[in-house]
Image (tube, grey):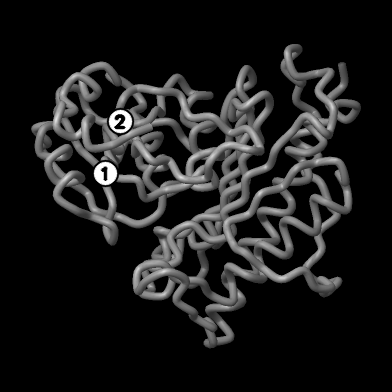
Amino acid sequence: MASRNTVLMRLVASAYSVAQKAGMIVRRVIAEGDLGIVEKTCATDLQTKADRLVQMSICSSLARKFPKLTIIGEEDLPSEEVDQELIEDGQWEEILKQPCPSQYSAIKEEDLVVWVDPLDGTKEYTEGLLDNVTVLIGIAYEGKAIAGIINQPYYNYEAGPDAVLGRTIWGVLGLGAFGFQLKEVPAGKHIITTTRSHSNKLVTDCVTAMNPDVVLRVGGAGNKIIQLIEGKASAYVFASPGCKKWDTCAPEVILHAVGGKLTDIHGNVLQYHKDVKHLNSAGVLATLRNYDYYASRVPESVKNALVP
């Protein structure tokens, strides 16, 4: 079936354009100089003007085009009239040229749940660590993450004034993942990527048990999965109930589409039904290759402390 006739591929094509608009909004807020920072639950749980504007842009743009979707965003925002300039109604034609995987060709709009993190890595955004920041749009069907879009607003930002800023990575299970160059960490090297701002004893114990050669501490779940697929890290280890479904839905798809694996610390697959609890209470373990090696090294004490 031609992709432009399938709900899933039309949604992915629209979400791609919406994510690119989101990246522009993220850059604009920084350029204007007023981040409008508010604390949500604590000093490391922040929300900025970019979080608010991007969520309004993504959710309103997709809801106008696909009114029967269930859309779940990170930010708890009051319902208000959305400025027309935040609406993106385009779609990425290159995606519509791709075939829709047959198992998804008959999906209806109302069967899909979209998980939105308007600004993954907000704390890093406020601190100027701009390459940690991503915009995440994940699409789930029957509880499974099946399509995802990751925009990196500041990709290339250290490459000089003439560099093109930003890129968008996208993927669909059964089709593949696009917009980046797949690379693997050299064989035998164990590079762990983990949280920068949400660490604790459990996180540290689990990372140490992996016997790492190098430990990278960075912000954003989207950023960490990109490190895996670009050969900068071998495993993403986060033994803590910190991240939420909107953090993992889109990145999980990109990783799975290239043969990687993302689970909780116990090895359970994450569920993305609309009624599922938002918290990934048993943490995250993700790898591009050699998942079993890392899973086998998770200490029992860590598993006992994290209840799915």
Horizontal relation, residue 138 to residue 223: left or right: right
Sequence order check, earlier mark of 2 and 1:
1
Horizontal relation, residue 176 to residue 181: left or right: right
Query: Which label belongs to residue 193?
Result: 1
In this view, the residue farthest toward the top is 102
Give the position of the C terminus as an image quadrant: top left
Q: Alpha-carbon neighbours of circle 2 within 10 Å: few (<14), some, or many (≥20)?
A: many
The kind of residue tagged 1 is: Thr
Identified at 38% across, 37% down, the residue is: 230
What x and y, as percent, mark residue 133? 46, 59
Horizontal relation, residue 283 to residue 30: left or right: left
For the image, the number of numbered tags is: 2
Q: Nearer the viewer, mark 2 or mark 1?
A: 2
Rendered image quadrant of residue 262: top left
Give the position of the N terminus as an image quadrant: top right
Horizontal relation, residue 36 to residue 224: left or right: right
User: Which of the two residues, 115 or 174, is positioned nearer the viewer here?
Assistant: 115
What x and y, as percent, mark residue 43? 35, 74
Query: Which label belongs to residue 265?
Result: 2
Identified at 36% across, 75% down, the residue is: 127
Above or below residue 15? Residue 288 is above
Above or below residue 236? Residue 87 is below
Above or below residue 190? Residue 239 is below
The kind of residue tagged 2 is: Ile
What x and y, as percent, mark residue 20? 67, 56
Identified at 59% across, 30% down, the residue is: 145
